[in-house]
Amino acid sequence: MKRLLFIFTLLFCSYVVKTQENAQAYNQVIKTLGIPKNKIDKDLYTEKVLPYDTHKLVMVFPIRKGNDENEATFDLYVVVYDFLQKRITQSYKGIDEYYSDAVELQELSIDTAKFILTEEIRAFGIRAFYKNGSKVNPYSEETFSLFLPENTSLKKILHQYQLSTYNGEWNYNCEGSWSDERNSMFIMDSKKTNGYFNIKDKQTFIKKATDKNCDDKVVEKSTKTVFLKYNGKEYKEE
């Protein structure tokens, strides 16, 4: 019993640390911006110190709207907090940013890869992962939004671009089951459009089939490269 209690305590502490790793900044931000604390989805809340600017913290507050457990819309606050100045330096508020239903929004994460837009400007991204609960017809999806710090605001310059999808059919007998996968890999290009580097998206498409021994085999694979270019307001696929 003591061991179970110890494990529960560890899990609980880990949960608290995940949701409020920097409690002082967390409380200051929600007070300053008037974020309704009781509406913050603590399972989806995330934060991350920028590895290239370590005195700054990115905080993502998903605000759940409605009381339906199986369906929800989320507003979104994205905040950059400066530890040295002890204040918010940039923020973004999105209305009805995410929607969750049978295909459930399960996770948000902050992506700090090298999204270098110019020689002096760097952006960061937010990934959203969705998944349904079906074993017969599984489906999952990951989307990506890109944010640019600009004066006192965060400008969203790419809106929920589809990074990956997975769907399939499982008939419990293995044979005849199949799946389709699509995955993206971003590479910053050397060419610019309207002052910002283009983003090269190398897409991979894989179709698999399952035989009677329940072994998956790739039956079709293809690749495609597309470019996302800045039109003066946001990145769009061309």
Image (cartoon, helix red, strand yellow):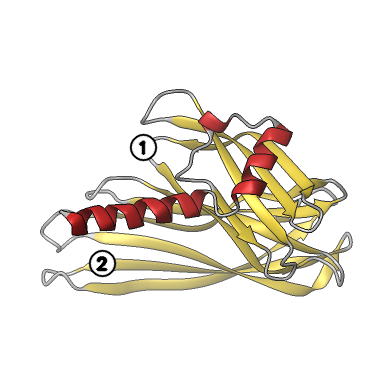
Label 2 sits on residue: 209
State the residue in front, 219 or 120: 120
Residue mark closest to the camera, 2 vs 1:
1
In the drawing, does residue 144 fall left or right of residue 6? right
Q: Could you say where residue 198 lies in the image, as x and y percent from the top left? A: 76, 66
Q: Which mark is residue 102?
A: 1
Residue type pointed to by label 1: Ala
State the residue in front, 15 or 235: 15
Q: State the residue at coordinates (62%, 39%).
A: 76
Classify mark 2: helix, strand or loop. strand
Considering every residue shown, the one lying at the far top of the view is 67
On the rendered image, what quadrant is the C terminus found in?
Answer: bottom right
Q: State the residue at coordinates (19%, 56%).
A: 2
Q: State the residue at coordinates (53%, 36%).
A: 40
Which circle's residue, 2 or 1, is located before the other in the chain?
1
User: Can residue 106 be spotted in the picture?
Assistant: yes
Q: Reply above or below: 235 against 216.
A: above
